[in-house]
Image (spheres, grey):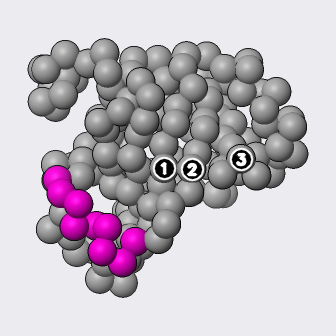
Amino acid sequence: MPQEIERKFLVASDGWRQGADHGTRFRQAYIAETDRVVVRVRIEDDTRGVLTIKSAAPGLSRQEFELPLKLEDAELLIELRQGSLLHKTRFRAPHEGHTWEVDIYAGDNDGLVIAEIELSSEDEKVKIPPWVGREVTGAASYYAARLARHPYASWSEAERGGRE
């Protein structure tokens, strides 16, 4: 079964930029969400569409299925979204044998920068880079499906401080 094992962190500084790639622009939207599953459509660099089905429970491990889409089909599915359209640029930044993904959000989520690391197992050890801040794995408010419904720009100071 396809499994995503991922940890999420806030980014504390721009140190990740050294050695990072040039980034990939994403537009993504959520077209269905229940307490068990989330269905997302994503367009990468205006050239490729992807439909993703994930188990909904936030946490370290989730089931994940990705299916390629024709660009024109992805554009049509985005129009069926629930919540706002998410805009972000993802950079891949190497550190100590792992590739971190740093997402810089724009639009309604401007100001939010999250680093993710995909692991091969839940107990895999990973060296945390000095530019990584507080861990937010499992904090539902930092998951993109939630950001589409409750964008970062609308968060209170308490929410930005990490209180759910």
SS at mark 3? loop
SS at mark 1? strand
Query: Pointer 2: what residue?
Result: 25
Q: Is residue 72 rendered to the left or right of residue 126?
A: right
Tell me the magenta residue range: 12-20
Q: Report how far apart the C-alphas of labels 1 and 2 lie in the structure.
A: 4 Å
Point 39% across, 18% down: residue: 150
- Mark sitting earlier along the chain (3/1): 3
Question: Would you place residue 112 above or below residue 11 in this image?
Answer: above
Q: Amino acid at mark 3?
A: Asp
Q: Amino acid at mark 1?
A: Thr
Query: Pointer 1: what residue?
Result: 89
The crowding category of the residue bearing disc 3, from other C-alpha atoms within 10 Å (few below 14, some 14 to 19, many at least 20), is: few
Point 28% across, 67% down: residue: 16
Q: Are marks 1 and 2 in contact (CB under 8 Å)?
A: yes
Q: Report how far apart the C-alphas of labels 3 and 1 lie in the structure.
A: 12 Å
The crowding category of the residue bearing disc 2, from other C-alpha atoms within 10 Å (few below 14, some 14 to 19, many at least 20), is: some
Point 73% across, 42% down: residue: 51
Point 43% across, 36% down: residue: 106
Q: Position of residue 71 (x, y in %)?
A: 83, 43
Q: Residue 128: which disc?
A: none
